[in-house]
Amino acid sequence: MNEQYVYNCYKFILKSNIPLSFLPKCNENFFMSDCIIDLSCHNEKTFDNEKIYCTKNNKDYIIESPLTSYVIDVENNRIKAYYKNKNELESTLYNLPFSILAHNCKDILLHASSIECNKKIIAFCADKGVGKTTFVSHLTKFTNVFSDDTLYLTRTNNIISCFSNSMPLKMNFSTFKSLSNEDNIFVTAKESLQGKKFIESRCLNLGFGNISGIFNLKCIFFLRRVRNKIGIEVKNIDNELQKKSLLLNNVVGISYLLPEHVKNILNSSLFIYIIQNIPFKYLDICDDLFCIHQCSEKFYYYILNEVV
C-alpha cells in the first residue's frame, strides 16, 4: 500500500502520495475537515506545451505547462500532477491549481505577502520585483510573517478569514544580506524556479505566525517603488473601479483563468465585500534596501496606531 502524507495547506487538508517540502504536517484532530484535497503525483510528463494554458474538459480543469501539468477534479477535490522535476512541482502546486480550487469554493487566492498583528492580517500586493518579501521580512523584527507570495481569503459571516500555506520566504541574495550575514544559509537553501532561494524564517530568527484559528483581513497595501524617495508614504485608495482593478489583477493566475472564472470572481459576494469593507492603500517606498530597513519600525507603529 502506498504511503500517504497529510498536510495543512491554506484552509484545506492536503493528502499526497509523495512527501512535500515545507508544508506543516496535519494534526490528526483536523482529519474530519470537509476541505480535503487528494493529490496524486506522477513522475512523468503528459503535456509539452511551451506556455501555460488552462482549459476545461467536462468537470475537470486542465493546466498544461512546460513545467508541471495538472488535472483538477473540482467536484471531488482531486488533483493529478504530472511532473519530471519535484522542484518544479512544489514551485507551481500552491498557485494556479489552488486558485482554481478557491474559485470553486467561492474564495480567492491572492498574490500577496502578509504579516499578523493580534490575529489581524495586513496584506501587501505589488508587481513582480517591487519588494513585497523584502518589506515584509524587515517588518518581522516587530511582528510575525503570516504568508509569503500567496494569501487565501474566504468569508466567514462578516469577517474575511485568511489562510497561509506556511511556505518559506522566497528571496534574492540582496534581500537575504539585508537580514543576515550567514551566507552559508543562502548557499545551501533550496532554489525556486525564479532563481531565488527558499529561506525558512527560523534560519533568520524571524517569527512565523501560527496558521490555526481565524485571522481577520484588516487592510491591503499596494506597494510601489519610487526613485529618489526618502522614507515611505501612505495614500488611501477610494475609487471603486481602481480598487476592483487592483484586487482582480492580484488574484493568483488571473491571466490564465478562464473568462467564466474572471466574471464569477468579479460578481462574487467575497470580491464585492472586500471592495466595500476592506481599506485599500498605496504604500510608496524608497528604492534603497537600507532605507527600507530604517523605515520598517516607523511603518509598524503606523499599523498599530492607524490600521489594527
Image (cartoon, rainbow, N blue to C red):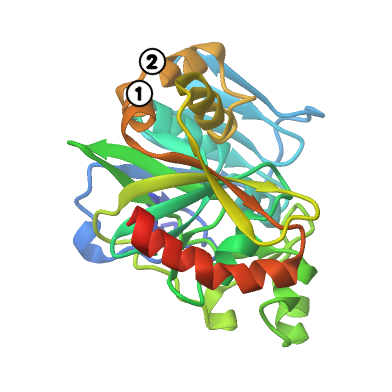
> In the drawing, what numbered circle is on residue 99?
none
Residue 258 in view here: yes
Residue at 65%, 63% in the rendered image: 134
Residue at 36%, 53% in the rendered image: 307
Please name the residue that numbered disc 1 is placed on: 272
Q: Are marks 1 and 2 in contact (CB under 8 Å)?
A: yes
Q: Could you tell me which quadrant the N terminus lies in? A: bottom left
Q: Element at badge 1?
A: helix
Looking at the image, residue 137 lies above or below residue 194 = below
> In the drawing, what numbered circle is on residue 267?
2
Looking at the image, residue 243 lies above or below residue 287 = above
Mark positioned earlier in the residue sequence (1 or 2): 2
Q: Nearer the viewer, residue 297 or 105?
A: 297
Residue at 50%, 31% in the rendered image: 247
Q: Nearer the viewer, residue 83 or 110?
A: 110
Q: Find residue 52 and report its horizontal and vertical position in percent.
A: 71, 29
Q: Find residue 155 and report its horizontal and vertical position in percent.
A: 27, 36
The picture quadrant where one finds residue 135 is bottom right
